[in-house]
Amino acid sequence: MMREKIEKAAEFLKRESSKTPKTGLILGSGLGVLADEIESPVKIEYSRIPDFPISTVEGHAGQLVFGTLSGKEVVAMQGRFHYYEGYSFEQVTFPVRVMKALGVETIIVTNAAGGVNESFQPGDLMIITDHINNMGGNPLIGPNDSELGVRFPDMSEAYSRKLQKIAKETAESIQLSIREGVYVGNTGPVYETPAEVRMTRILGGDAVGMSTVPEVIVARHSGMQVLGISCISNMAAGILDQPLTHDEVIETTERVRADFLRYIKEIVKSI
Ligand code: HPA
C-alpha cells in the first residue's frame, strides 16, 4: 500500500538525517547546484531510500540533501524524476509524498522551461502563477487515500499567492528582474513543434516544460504550499530560427546560475 511505502521511506530518512525541515526544494535541470550550497549537508542517494526511483537523465545527481540554507532547515531533491523517463506519475511524485511525511509544509519547485511568451528571453527567471496540465494524465487517478488528501482537490491556488508575493518582493529587494506566467507541462521527451508552441500561447501558456505539474498536484493534494520558479533556458520551438538542444538548456541555466542561487537563497530566508 502506498501509505506504507511513504512511511517506510520517511522513517528511513528520519533515522539517516535526524532533521525536520519545513521547506523542500525540487531542483530542475542544471539547477541542482543549489544543493551544493546547503550547509552541514547530509546527502542520501536515491538508490538507498526504500521505494525511491532512480534518476537517469544527464545533469541530475540523484540524491536528497538535508541541511541548512540561509539559516533555514531544508531538504532538497538534487535531481528529479520525469514522466518521460518511463516512471509512472506515482513514482514521479513519490518524493513529494515522502517530504510531506517528513513534515515539509512548503515546496519550492524549480525547472528549466522554454519561453512561449515572446517578450521573454533565455536566461529570464519566471514566477509560476499557475499551470496547465497537458501531460494526458494525473498522479491522483486511482483509489484515493483520504489520509493523504481529498478525492477532488481544489486547484484554484495551485501556486500560493502569498509565496508569489514574497518571491516578487524578494526579486525587487535584490534588484533582479523577474517574469511571471503560466507553465504548461507536456510529457516530452520531444520538444514541442512550432504549431504546438503557437497553440500553447493561444491557450494562455507563457512557458513550456516536461516536469513540475505532477509534483505540484501531489503537493496540493497533501496540503503543502507551493512556489514555482522557472528558468527560461531557451525560446520554445519556432520562435527563433534555430533547433533546440539540451546543451542550450544546460548552457543557459549555467549562465544564470549565480542569479538563480542568490534568488532562491533570499526567498528561503523570507519564508
Ligand atoms: N520545451 C519543453 N521543455 C523544456 C524546454 C522547451 O522548450 N526547454 C527546457 N525544457
Image: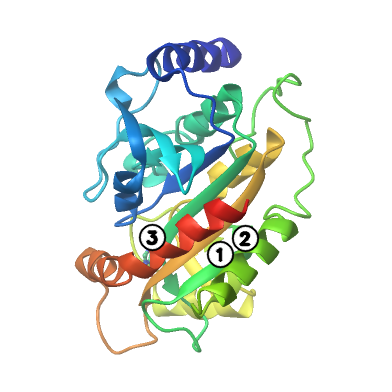
Give coordinates of residue 220: x percent, y percent. Answer: 68, 41
Residue 183 circle label = 1
For the residues labelled 2 and 1, say whether their Cβ atoms are less than 8 Å apart.
yes
Locate the N terminus and report the quarter of the image it occupies. top right
Q: Which residue is mark 2?
A: 132
Residue 164 vs residue 85: left or right?
A: right
The x, y position of residue 222, in whole percent, is 68, 32
Q: Is residue 152 visible?
A: yes
Given this view, does label 3 or label 1 mark the residue nearer the observer? 3
Residue drawn 38% across the image and 52% down it: 28
Amino acid type, residue under disc 3 in the picture:
Leu
> How many numbered badges does the structure rendering display?
3
State the CA–CA distance, disc 2 to disc 1.
6 Å
Question: Horizontal and vertical percent for residue 132?
Answer: 62, 60
Under mark 2, the amino acid is: Ile
Q: Could you tell me which residue is drawn at 37 percent across and 32 percent down?
A: 64
**Residue 259 or 227: which is nearer the viewer?**
259
* Image quarter of residue 133: bottom right
Q: Is residue 19 left or right of residue 161?
A: left
What x and y, as percent, mark residue 25?
Answer: 48, 44
> Could you tell which of marks 2 and 3 lies nearer the N-terminus?
2
Give the mark nearer the N terminus: 2 vs 1. Answer: 2
Residue type beneath disc 1: Tyr
Residue at disc 1, secondary structure: strand
Q: Are marks 2 and 3 in contact (CB under 8 Å)?
A: no
Is residue 165 left or right of 110 when viewed as pictured? right
The tag on residue 74 is none
The residue under the point 77% across, 40% down is: 153
- For the residue pair 152 and 190, the one nearer the viewer reads as 152
Q: Is residue 90 something one can see in this rendering?
A: no
Please tell me the numbered disc located at residue 261: 3
Q: Is mark 2 within 8 Å of ligand 1?
A: no
